[in-house]
Image (cartoon, rainbow, N blue to C red):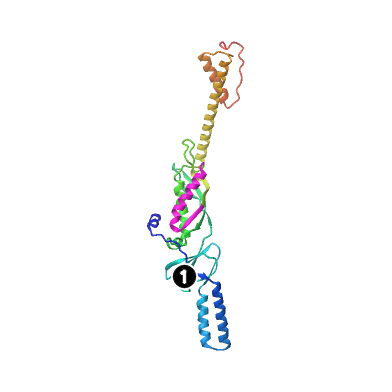
Amino acid sequence: MFMELKSMEASRETDASTASGYPMLVVILLSLLAIAYGVRFPSLLVLIPAGLIFAFVSAGFYMLQPNQAAVITLFGSYRGTDRTHGLRWVWPWMGRKKISARANNIHSDRIKINDLRGNPIEIACNVVWRVRDTAQASFDVDDYREFVNIQIEAGLRTVGSRHPYDDIEEGETTLRGDGDQVNAELLTELNERLKVAGIVVDEAGLTHLAYAPEIAGAMLRRQQAEAVIAARAKLVLGAVSMVEMALAKLSEDNIVHLDDERRAAMVSNLMVVLCGERDTQPIVNTGTLYNG
């Protein structure tokens, strides 16, 4: 349906030829006075025209509030949009359909999708949208509000499936770690989908993101393992640097001279001390370094 709508000739909003309703109130008052005169002094020549004028003018009134528009039609043909708020008037035979141009806020339901790695996840978003083109919203889609709801879900599925939930190893854009980038991508995707209905999205962002319950436990253990591996890798790098500094300092200050075998033994001992999870127990060597 999305591709078919893009190929349609899009409607375009134009200004409608309407008038302020306040001058017509004067006509209404004059017709009422004429009707009262015709009743007080019975006269069909006054009563009938005054009654017709009253009915004719009264049928053309409508009211618009701020950020509200009226789509004007004539026998099914679009004749423009009136966005001037206040008391308005148009020819009685012209149709008037009011559309809100105010911002709307939608918090989507949680939906289950598969991320880039095929892992099932639950995701939801919040979207702020408004009608930009009343002609497109009225004539290019059947129900623009329902269209917005469906396209929000479709756009959320599309963006969610483009990225993994979390991936420490490859350093890709992830749903959990790159929220700003994912939200910007979602905003672009929704604007592209909803422009055919004259809708513009002002804000879009993820509000819920979690692994599906059936794999949540396994993925939590995986995240914990990845965190442990990353921490140990950093610990080893730091230990190697400290051992290198220690050996360089011993050699530079001529404190002790070690052959390759004793150097390897010292490196092994230092690595055990620096990388071990438990406190080390010192052993006092009462002999020489090479006899201990």
Residue 110 part of the magenta-drawn span: no
From the image, which quarter does the N terminus lie in? bottom left
Q: Tell me the residue that label 1 is attached to.
A: 95
For image coordinates 53% across by 88% down, the residue present is 43
Please give the name of the residue rendered at 50% of the width and 81% of the height, measured from the top-left corner: 52
Prevailing secondary structure of the magenta residues? helix
Q: Is residue 184 magenta?
A: yes
Q: Residue furthest bottom?
A: 42
Q: Is residue 147 above or below residue 94?
A: above
Residue 94 visible (yes or no): yes
Rendered location of residue 234, percent (x, y): 53, 30
Front in this rendered view, residue 151 or 231: 151
Q: Amino acid at mark 1?
A: Gly
Left or right: where 238 falls relative to 161: right
Position in image of residue 120 (x %, y %): 46, 45
- Residue 108 shows up from this direction: no
Identity of the residue drawn at 44% across and 48% down: 158
Depth check, front residue: 118 or 87: 87
Q: How many marks?
A: 1
Q: Is residue 147 above or below residue 30?
A: above
Residue 67 place in picture, x, y as percent: 54, 62
Pointer 1: residues within 10 angstroms few (<14), some, or many (20+)?
some
Q: Is residue 149 above or below residue 64?
A: above
* Image-quadrant location for residue 258: top right
> Can you say which quadrant of the picture contains the C terminus?
top right
Q: Please report the bounds of the magenta region as a residue range.
A: 177-202
Rendered position, 126 above or below 36: above
Residue 64: where, in percent of width, then height?
Answer: 54, 66
Which type of secondary structure does the marked residue at label 1 adopt? Answer: strand
